[in-house]
Image (cartoon, rainbow, N blue to C red):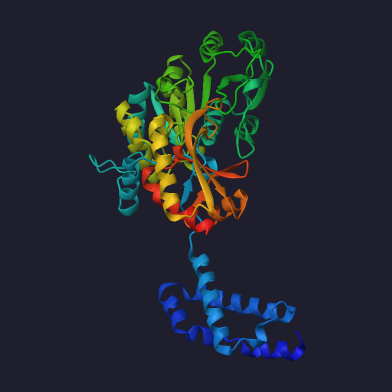
């Protein structure tokens, strides 16, 4: 572009004030903060100037001033739309991974959502005893429910399971040794590992046994005057198979009693119901583990339990009371919305069949294959009604879902999927377009086809998902 053309194009650009006086921009100013609109206008104009000066805007000299204004206003509207969109927003999970860590893990039940809305919208008796009018405990409602559901002597809830492990070790073993099997030194997610959490607590790690085999005698040989605790970590996010031997929690409790040492079990993802009757792998329930007699049991609230993010600590009153007095407890305490959501979730478990029907995680784990196939054919029908066959092909097939969230690593859940084979773009490009949409959609790509798994899609999302796929393809 010649220097004269550049100058002409630059003169054609509207000023910031001219853009702000446009009726459409004035309307935006009524609905959005001025700083956002102003920033968007300046960004668009700066981008246009850069294009002109770099020579990239070759046709700009032919554009009239009013056309420039139109173009700048349109681009400003697009920039504002992105700027005011929340960073944390809705995603339709079509991956089939039920407890998808990147997508927020467990969905809350309707009862839990209502409870959160009530305490978020109103004042509550979070730390007030309404009977006496005196200060109460934010944990009281949760303690009663947890102890009645599990048979534990006492309970405490913190903000996640890593915090629960940290608090328990800091309280019962700071400055002393904790013995754990080498095969149980798991990474719990986000590159955080049991040895690192233990080091942060001030406890000293003592590894025993081999990766695939640890015997009760390995623990006995490692016990000394510095030993504070025996730790059992349930490998809920992986399995070692083949030539193996694991010391059970029951065997560890016997050793603890023999040497007068407390025993702690970190379940990771804790189950309150046995769902093996639905064809799921046998997992130890919280009640079964507590029945073996450990002093402390910890697990997550937002995995197989199906509640909000939380770390749940159950066990002997002596140790729980000491944890409640640890200053670290305040640093890892739960807020009012977590308390409300977890209480409502736990109340669902007072009726086991109701819990399976009402808690989304349990619904998705136990849903009938026939229901999944019906959803798949409904989705396929929606897609075929809005899209021409020349744009994409849709087929209903069987597939495999995953539990996710570091739970049931060996589980393969038979599911129904809709495979989308786009004609004009690749499956990867379709996946990216869906991810950038509103609402965003997450699926998985296999053999240049986009796979939409119906296990993690509700009936109410089918039409919305079909419309999102149509927009992305068109």
Residue 295, image x, y percentages:
48, 20
- Residue 140 in view, yes or no: no
- Residue 78 in view, yes or no: yes
Residue 297, image x, y percentages:
48, 24
Question: Is 442 left, or right, of 145 in this rendering?
Answer: right
Question: Is 418 left, or right, of 244 in this rendering?
Answer: left
* Residue found farthest to the front: 390
User: How many labels sit on residues?
Assistant: 0
Residue 194, image x, y percentages:
62, 30
* Residue found farthest to the left: 131
**Which residue occupies the foreground of this view, 245 or 147?**
245
Identify the residue shown where x is 44% and y is 35%: 301
**Which residue occupies the foreground of this view, 98 or 160?**
98
Q: Is residue 25 above or below residue 313?
A: below
Q: Is residue 251 above or below residue 44?
A: above
**Which residue occupies the foreground of this view, 277 or 39?**
277
**Which residue occupies the foreground of this view, 45 or 133?**
45
Image quarter (top left, top right, bottom left or bottom right) of the N terminus:
bottom right
Question: Is 309 left, or right, of 46 in this rendering?
Answer: left
Residue 241, image x, y percentages:
62, 17
Q: Is residue 76 above or below residue 257?
A: below
Figure quadrant of residue 372 = top left
Identify the residue shown where x is 42% and y is 15%: 291
């Amino acid at each position: 572009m010649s220097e004269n053309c550049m100058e002409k194009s630059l003169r054609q650009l509207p000023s910031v004030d001219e853009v702000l006086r446009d009726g459409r921009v004035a309307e935006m100013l009524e609905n959005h903060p001025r700083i956002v609109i102003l920033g968007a206008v300046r960004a668009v104009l700066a981008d246009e100037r850069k294009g002109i000066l770099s020579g990239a805007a070759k046709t700009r000299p032919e554009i009239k001033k009013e056309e420039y204004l139109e173009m700048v206003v349109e681009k400003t509207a697009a920039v504002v739309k992105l700027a005011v969109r929340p960073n944390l927003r809705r995603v339709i999970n079509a991956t089939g991974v039920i407890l998808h860590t990147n997508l927020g893990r467990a969905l809350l039940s309707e009862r839990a959502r209502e409870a959160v809305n009530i305490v978020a919208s109103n004042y509550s008796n979070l730390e007030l005893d309404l009977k006496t009018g005196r200060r109460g405990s934010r944990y009281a409602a949760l303690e009663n429910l947890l102890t009645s559901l599990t048979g534990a002597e006492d309970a405490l809830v913190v903000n996640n399971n890593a915090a629960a492990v940290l608090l328990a070790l800091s309280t019962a073993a700071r400055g002393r040794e904790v013995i754990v099997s080498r095969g149980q030194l798991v990474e719990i997610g986000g590159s955080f590992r049991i040895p690192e959490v233990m080091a942060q607590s001030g406890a000293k790690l003592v590894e025993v046994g081999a990766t695939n085999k640890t015997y009760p005698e390995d623990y006995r040989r490692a016990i000394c005057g510095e030993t504070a605790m025996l730790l059992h970590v349930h490998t809920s996010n992986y399995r070692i198979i083949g030539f193996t031997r694991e010391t059970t929690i029951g065997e560890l409790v016997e050793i603890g009693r023999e040497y007068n040492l407390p025993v702690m079990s970190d379940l990771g993802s804790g189950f309150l119901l046995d769902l093996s009757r639905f064809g799921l792998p046998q997992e130890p329930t919280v009640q079964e583990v507590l029945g073996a007699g450990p002093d402390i049991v910890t697990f997550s609230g937002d995995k197989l339990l199906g509640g909000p993010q939380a770390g749940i600590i159950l066990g002997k009153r002596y140790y729980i009371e000491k944890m409640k007095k640890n200053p670290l407890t305040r640093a890892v305490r739960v807020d009012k919305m977590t308390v409300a959501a977890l209480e409502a979730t736990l109340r669902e478990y007072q009726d086991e069949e109701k819990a399976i029907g009402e808690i989304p995680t349990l619904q998705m784990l136990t849903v009938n294959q026939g229901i999944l196939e019906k959803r798949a054919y409904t989705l396929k029908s929606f897609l075929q009604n809005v899209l021409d066959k020349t744009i994409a092909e849709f087929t209903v097939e069987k597939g495999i879902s995953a539990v996710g969230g570091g739970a049931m690593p060996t589980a393969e859940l038979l599911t129904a999927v809709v495979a989308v084979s786009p004609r004009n773009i690749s499956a990867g490009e379709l996946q990216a377009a869906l991810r950038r949409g509103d609402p965003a959609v997450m699926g998985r790509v296999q053999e240049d086809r986009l796979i939409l798994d119906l296990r993690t899609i509700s009936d109410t999302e089918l039409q919305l998902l079909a419309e999102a796929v149509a927009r992305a393809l068109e």
